[in-house]
Image (cartoon, grey):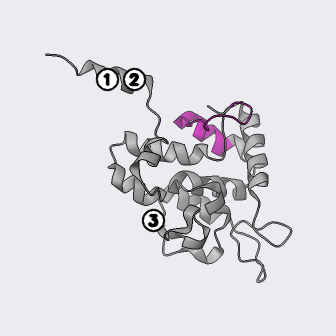
Amino acid sequence: MKVAGNGQGKVLTAPELKRLFSDGFVCERDRALFAICLFTGCRISEALALQVTDIKNKTITFRKSTTKGKLKTRTIDIPVTLLGYLEEYQPPPNPYNPYLFPSRAGKALTRSMADKLLRAACHRIGVEGVSTHSFRRTALTQMHNAGIPLRHIQEISGHNDLGTLQRYLEVSPEQRKKAVSVIGW
């Protein structure tokens, strides 16, 4: 868990996610932004770099130029829940600013602003240890716990190697207990 800016962002539980999206975030833009991070497992920087045209035919395309390492473009299907958040949010029309999450300065919303929005939302619902990376860690851990093969998760997350991906996955005390319970004769 992240403490005073140190450590990994917390993996959020289902009740924490529900409270965050119902009571923590106060506007459709914030819900849509962090829902993209959760339902696609993307980094906050990748979500903030999205342009309106990157969402079409019920897919989100994270362009190679905006991904960490700039290695390849990823296209991810939009699940129904995320689709709902995206339909509720309509970015202000501006032919000079193509970003899905525009700032007043005519560019994309910044990472520091996204961090402030998240901190305020978490404060409203009383959850600590959350960072913008928590949504990525939560998504990848949930997929892993659901039995999705690591290779599939790797394709969605954009990780180059499985070793890096595995550092994101949280192992619960129950999972450790179950793992040692199968040993023996």
Three-letter amino acid code at the position of disc 2 = Glu
**Front disc: 1 or 3:** 1
Which quarter shows the C terminus? top left
Which quarter shows the N terminus? top right
Q: Residues within 10 Å of mark 1 (few under 14, many from 20)?
A: few
Three-letter amino acid code at the position of disc 1 = Lys
In terms of depth relative to the viewer, which is nearer, 85 or 172?
A: 172
Q: Which residue was labeled with disc 3?
A: 77
Q: Are marks 2 and 1 in contact (CB under 8 Å)?
A: yes
Image point 42% across, 53% down: which residue?
161
Three-letter amino acid code at the position of disc 3 = Asp
The magenta stretch spans residue 175: no
In terms of depth relative to the viewer, which is nearer, 20 or 12?
A: 12
Q: Which residue was labeled with disc 1?
A: 178
Circle on res. 52: none
**Front disc: 3 or 2:** 2
Where residue 79 appears, as percent x and y from the top left, is 47, 59
Label count reads: 3
Task: Specify start and end residues of the magenta stretch as a single range.
Answer: 3-22
Check the image and name the residue furthest to the right: 105
Identify the mark nearer the N-term, 3 or 2: 3
**Image quadrant of residue 174?**
top left
Where residue 119 appears, as percent x and y from the top left, is 75, 41
Image point 63% across, 61% down: which residue?
47
Query: Circle 3 sits in a helix, a strand or a loop, which is it?
Result: strand
Query: Circle 1 sits in a helix, a strand or a loop, which is it?
Result: helix
Q: Which residue was labeled with disc 2?
A: 174
Q: Is residue 165 above or below residue 42?
A: above
